[in-house]
Image (cartoon, rainbow, N blue to C red):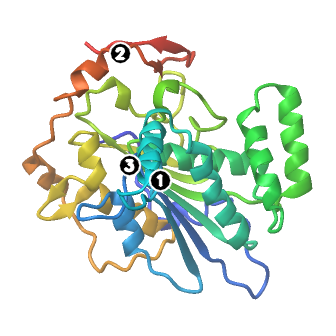
C-alpha cells in the first residue's frame, strides 16, 4: 500500500479543527447526511460492492440519514415477455455506453440532500468508479451553485446546466448570483470517500465538470486506488498530479494491490475487504457512525493478496479503440490514447 499523504492525522487534528462546515444553531445537534452512489451496472445482489457494504454498515437514527443509488445502467426491468423488457434492456445498454442517465443520478442525490439538509448538518459522499465521479461532481455543484432551499425542485435541472457550463467570468458571476438567490448559506461537503474514480462517460471520456479534479472545497477527501489496473479506459482521476505543486493537506490517496474489479468488492484478506475497512476508519474519524464492531486490518496481510488480472478477454480489443481521456499533465489537455 502506498500513501501520498504521510502526515499523521487523528480525529483531533482533522476534525473539528480543519472542518469548515456550518455549526448547528444553539441548542440543536448536527446530523450526518450520507450519500452512496454505485458504479456502472452495480446493484444489490449475491456479490455486493463496497458502496453497498458501507451503506449497510451505517447506523440510521434521527441524527444520521442515508441514501443509495445503484448508478448508471441499472433501471429495473419488467417481465421478459413484454415489449417493455426489451426496450428497457436496450436503454440500459445505451446508458452503459454513453451514460445518458448521468445527470439523472446526480440530481437524484442532490434533490435528496436539498429535501433533508438542515443548517449544521454534515454531508458525507461515497462512490465507486463512475459513482465516485458522480459524488465529486455533486460536491462541485454544491460549492458552485449551492444547495437549494426545499421547495425549489423545478429549478434543480437549471442549476445543473449552470454548473456544467461554468467556464469564464460571466458564467461564474451567474452561478454566484444563483447561489445567493436560491441556495442555503454556508453549505459545505464534510467528507468525500471514493474508490477508483473513473470519469469515462462512455464515448465522451474526457468531458470535465468544475471542481471534479480538486478537493479544496471539502473538509476531507479520501481516495482508494487500484495499483495493478492496466486498462486505459479505467484510468483513475487522481487529485495528485504534475499540475499540483503541493498535495492538499485535507486529502489522502492510497494505492491498494489489485485491479479495478478488486476495489469493486474489496481485496479480501482473511474474509475482510481492506479498501472498505480503510475507508470506514477514515469516515469514523470524520464523525460517521458505523455499526460494525471491528474494522481492524494489517498492512502486512496485503502481501497474501493475489490481484485479479485486468487486461483479459474482450478488454484487449476495447483498449485498441482511440477513446479520449484526460492526459495526466500540467495542462490537463485531452489526448488520443491507444493502450500498449
Residue 244 image offset from top left, x and y in percent:
54, 27
Determine the residue positioned at 42% across, 61% down. Answer: 78
**Foreground: disc 2 or disc 1:** 1
- The residue singled out by tag 1 in the image is 84
Tell me which numbered mark, 2 or 1, is placed earlier along the sequence.
1
Confirm whether residue 18 shows in the render: no
Confirm whether residue 238 shows in the render: yes
Specify whether 125 is left or right of 29: left
Tell me which numbered mark, 2 or 3, is placed earlier along the sequence.
3
- The residue singled out by tag 3 in the image is 41
Secondary-structure class at tag 2 = loop
2 and 3 marks in contact (CB < 8 Å) = no
Q: Nearer the viewer, residue 5 or 133?
A: 133
In the rendered view, tell whether residue 338 sits above or below residue 49: above
In the rendered view, tell whether residue 88 sits above or below residue 53: above
Residue 251 image offset from top left, x and y in percent:
49, 46
Amino acid at each position: 500500500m502506498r500513501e501520498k499523504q504521510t502526515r499523521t492525522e487523528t480525529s483531533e487534528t482533522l476534525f473539528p479543527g480543519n472542518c469548515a462546515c456550518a455549526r448547528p444553531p444553539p441548542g440543536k445537534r448536527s446530523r450526518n447526511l450520507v450519500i452512496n452512489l454505485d458504479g456502472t451496472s452495480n446493484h444489490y445482489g449475491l456479490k455486493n460492492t463496497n458502496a453497498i457494504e458501507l451503506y449497510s454498515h451505517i447506523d440510521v437514527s434521527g441524527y444520521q440519514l442515508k441514501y443509495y443509488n445503484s448508478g448508471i445502467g441499472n433501471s429495473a426491468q419488467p417481465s421478459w415477455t413484454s415489449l417493455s423488457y426489451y426496450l428497457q434492456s436496450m436503454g440500459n445498454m445505451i446508458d452503459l455506453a454513453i451514460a445518458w442517465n448521468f445527470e439523472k443520478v446526480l440530481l437524484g442525490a442532490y434533490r435528496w440532500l436539498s429535501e433533508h439538509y438542515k443548517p449544521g448538518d454534515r454531508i458525507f459522499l461515497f462512490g465507486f468508479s463512475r459513482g465516485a465521479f458522480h459524488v465529486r461532481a455533486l460536491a462541485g455543484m454544491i460549492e458552485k451553485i449551492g444547495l437549494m432551499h426545499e421547495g425549489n425542485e423545478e429549478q434543480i435541472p437549471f442549476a445543473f446546466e449552470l454548473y456544467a457550463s461554468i467556464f469564464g467570468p460571466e458564467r461564474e458571476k451567474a452561478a454566484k448570483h444563483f447561489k445567493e438567490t436560491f441556495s442555503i448559506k454556508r453549505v459545505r461537503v464534510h467528507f468525500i470517500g471514493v474508490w477508483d474514480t473513473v470519469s469515462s462517460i462512455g464515448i465522451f471520456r474526457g468531458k470535465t465538470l468544475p471542481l471534479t479534479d480538486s478537493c479544496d472545497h471539502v473538509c476531507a477527501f479520501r481516495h482508494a486506488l487500484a495499483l495493478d489496473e492496466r486498462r486505459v479506459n479505467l484510468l483513475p482521476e487522481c487529485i495528485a498530479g504534475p499540475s499540483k505543486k503541493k498535495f492538499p493537506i485535507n486529502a489522502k490517496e492510497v494505492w491498494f494491490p489489485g485491479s479495478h474489479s478488486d476495489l469493486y468488492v474489496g481485496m479480501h484478506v482473511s474474509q475482510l475487504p481492506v479498501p472498505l475497512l480503510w475507508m470506514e476508519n477514515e469516515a469514523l474519524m470524520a464523525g460517521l457512525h458505523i455499526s460494525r464492531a471491528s474494522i481492524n486490518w494489517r498492512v502486512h496481510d496485503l502481501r497474501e493478496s493475489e490481484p485479479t488480472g485486468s487486461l483479459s478477454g474482450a478488454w484487449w480489443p476495447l483498449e485498441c479503440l482511440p477513446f479520449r481521456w484526460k492526459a495526466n499533465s500540467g495542462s490537463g489537455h485531452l489526448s488520443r490514447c491507444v493502450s500498449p
